[in-house]
Image (cartoon, rainbow, N blue to C red):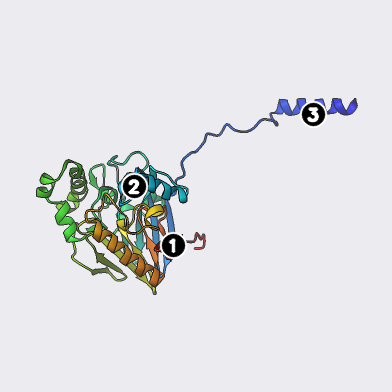
Amino acid sequence: MTRKLTSLALAALLACTGATSAFAAAPLVKTPNPGYFHMMLGDFEVTAIGDGTIELPVNTLITGMKPAQVDAELAKVHLKSPLDTSVNGFVINTGSKLVLVDTGSGDSGAFGPNVGRFLANLKAAGYTPEQVDEIYITHLHLDHVGGLISGGKIAFPNAIVRAQKKEADFWLSQANLDKASADMKGFFKGAQTSLQPYVAAGKFKPFEGDTELLPGIRAHAGDGHTPGHSRYLVESKGQKLVLVGDLIHVAGVQLAHPELTVGFDLNAKDAAAERKQEFDAAVKGGYLVGAPHIQFPGLGHLVKEGKGYAWIPVNYSSVR
């Protein structure tokens, strides 16, 4: 009897103090928010900057495979369509220059509420827009150049913007805009709105072909995804990183099936050929790859697997 009374008394005491309550008052966070990832490449510091994710109906965007087949390929890697697709930009700090490669989608609102975080995450990574010296653009689609402006004004006041001349000539042409299909007009308008303030300020300096832009950073020209799509090879102390731009959009499918392209590729045949060439070189050379649309931080190595490739994400390290 005494033991029973003691137990009842203890239960009453715990109830009064709230000790038996489940502390579930904290709200659910729901959304992960990776913002930046630092790593060293020789003497250079490379930082992946997350702009957020865009929900894409990839099962209808991939060409050369039926939607049901795409769904089956995605299921193999525990993904599904519509797919939350990363938008990544990259910072290269050479020690003397601060360089951006792509700038995310900006505040256009064109891609939904889960992107447009590039500037905030750049600042969280320890950099200010005023510190940026040069910006290299892979191509002039809005999810890569939208972040050039903020509130309609130049976001990086001290930066020179560079891209392939063929790319600029195509997207900044009023004549091309006028004759474009209704579906394509938005691509032209996005490029022109984002880049024209820099053109007007004399801060846009296009280049042609394969060329060294800074010691350790070299542009490689292409024409598959867009007419002047560029990749950038970064090298310091023998360590290499290639920033491939939109050579790949849906890693869960296109790594295993590198012959597949997407509806955004203006020249699908060349886009597939460039992907194979660049990916084979990365495998052979064993160097790092940075991709805007592979899951954040979009940095890793490629290895051959069957007729395609496998992706090995960069190792996380807290060592400084």
**Amino acid at the residue labelled 1:** Met
Query: Which label number is shown at residue 10?
Result: 3
**Crowd rating for badge 3 (residues with CA inside 10 Å; few <14, some 14–19, many 20+):** few
Q: Do the residues labelled 3 and 2 touch (CB within 8 Å)?
A: no
- Residue 256 placement (x, y as % from top left): 40, 58
- On the question of residue 116 being in view, the answer is no
- Residue 175 placement (x, y as % from top left): 9, 49
Q: How many marks can you see? A: 3
Quick one: label 3 or label 2, which is nearer the N terminus?
3
**Crowd rating for badge 1 (residues with CA inside 10 Å; few <14, some 14–19, many 20+):** some
Query: Which label number is shown at residue 39?
Result: 1
**Amino acid at the residue labelled 3:** Leu
**Amino acid at the residue labelled 2:** Lys
Q: Residue drawn 19% across and 52% down?
A: 198
- On the question of residue 154 being in view, the answer is yes
Q: Nearer the viewer, residue 214 or 129?
A: 214
Give the quarter of the figure containing the N terminus. Answer: top right
Q: Nearer the viewer, residue 194 or 243?
A: 243
When asked about the image quadrant of residue 110, the answer is top left
Judging from the image, what secondary structure is the residue with disc 3 in? helix
- Residue 45 placement (x, y as % from top left): 40, 64
Q: Name the residue under label 2.
A: 66
